[in-house]
């Protein structure tokens, strides 16, 4: 973490580690979400039709998304798992079309089988919210595929999202558990240069846990496994802890779409803290935020501050 006499310098800008196989730009990347599901928490059903999902993905790219993250299994609180065949039927047509158009596509899945088929269809990275815990074959598969791999902090499936949300020191425990997962996937052969970590906001986390993690991102990224920080993916977009913060005086929680402006504010803050990428539902304002932050950090670097 930054010491009292240190500036929150352009180190995040200069230190935005390029992940082999993904876009290299002098700012935080923006990942646009395409949920090909009938029940995702913020837009369930909106993009369930493959043609609509493809159109939406192309629109996200046209608005500035660097990566499109395609998922076919909801991980909202209380969600049940879907059969692999259903997940495949949902995502493969979408991945195929988006990749064929020349876009960087990420597959959001906990299954090695789905990841394999998606990479064959043109996806270039795997975003696994279980960090390899849900499918023991995932790390070995990713190692052989030699693609970027998002390892998220996870304590169990969404059917019991908040049962495991008990922490003494959430920052220390998430960091320690992430370190164990990264060590495990690297031991399975995954190239550490291709590992991206995600603190798992909302997953077995209550609102106060999410805010603590957001306030300490640099500590989480500095795992005791290599000298430089790991690239960090932050996925705060439209999550319930934002809606709860912005609740009306009568207690009515802010709608998912009504949290988009606050998401943009968070994007600016986490980009300034050094996040490698933000995962968001709406792209234009978030792209503006990371560009503004990059310019300010560039100026600080030029001024030696």
Image: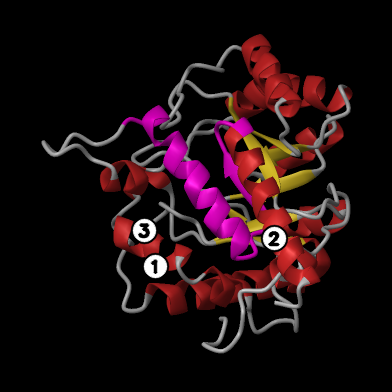
Q: Position of residue 225 (x, y in %)?
A: 70, 82
Is 118 left, or right, of 176 in this rendering? right
Q: Is residue 132 visible?
A: no
The residue indicated by pointer 3 is 205
| SS category of the residue bearing label 2 | strand
Distance from disc 1 to disc 3, alpha carbons, whole Å, reads: 10 Å
- Figure quadrant of the C terminus: bottom right
Q: Are marks 2 and 3 in contact (CB under 8 Å)?
A: no
Q: Position of residue 103 (x, y in %)?
A: 83, 31
Q: Position of residue 291 (x, y in %)?
A: 70, 47
| SS category of the residue bearing label 1 | helix
Q: Nearer the viewer, mark 1 or mark 3?
A: 1
The residue indicated by pointer 1 is 212
Q: Is residue 302 magenta?
A: no
Distance from disc 2 to disc 3, alpha carbons, whole Å, reads: 20 Å
For the point 61% across and 48% down, the residue is 278
Q: Earlier in the sequence, mark 2 or mark 1?
A: 2
For the point 70% across and 60% down, the residue is 196
Q: Nearer the viewer, mark 2 or mark 1?
A: 1
| SS category of the residue bearing label 3 | loop
Q: Are marks 1 and 3 in contact (CB under 8 Å)?
A: no
- Figure quadrant of the N terminus: bottom right
The residue indicated by pointer 2 is 196
């Amino acid at each position: 973490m930054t010491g009292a006499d240190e500036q929150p310098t352009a180190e995040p800008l200069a230190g935005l580690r390029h992940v082999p196989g993904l876009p290299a730009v002098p700012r935080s990347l923006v990942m646009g979400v395409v949920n090909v599901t009938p029940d995702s928490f913020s837009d369930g059903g909106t993009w369930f039709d493959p043609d609509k999902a493809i159109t939406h993905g192309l629109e996200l790219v046209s608005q500035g998304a660097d990566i499109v993250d395609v998922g076919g299994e909801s991980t909202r609180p209380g969600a049940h798992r879907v059969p692999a065949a259903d997940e495949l039927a949902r995502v493969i047509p979408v991945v195929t079309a988006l990749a064929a158009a020349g876009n960087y596509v990420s597959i959001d899945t906990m299954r090695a089988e789905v990841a394999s088929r998606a990479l064959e269809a043109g996806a270039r990275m795997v975003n696994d919210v279980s960090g390899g815990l849900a499918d023991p074959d995932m790390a070995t598969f990713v190692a052989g595929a030699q693609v970027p791999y998002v390892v998220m902090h996870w304590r169990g499936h969404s059917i019991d999202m908040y049962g495991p949300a008990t922490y003494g020191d959430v920052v220390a425990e998430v960091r320690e558990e992430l370190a164990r997962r990264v060590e495990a996937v690297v031991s399975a052969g995954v190239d550490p240069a291709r590992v991206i970590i995600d603190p798992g906001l909302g997953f077995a986390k209550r609102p106060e846990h999410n805010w603590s993690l957001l306030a300490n991102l640099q500590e989480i990224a500095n795992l005791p496994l290599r000298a430089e920080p790991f690239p960090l993916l932050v996925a705060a977009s439209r999550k319930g802890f934002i809606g709860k913060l912005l609740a009306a005086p009568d207690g009515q929680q802010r709608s998912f779409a009504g949290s988009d402006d606050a998401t943009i504010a968070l994007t600016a803050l986490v980009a300034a803290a050094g996040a490698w990428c933000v995962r968001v539902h709406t792209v234009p304002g978030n792209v503006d935020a990371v560009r503004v932050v990059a310019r300010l950090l560039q100026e600080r670097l030029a001024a030696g501050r």
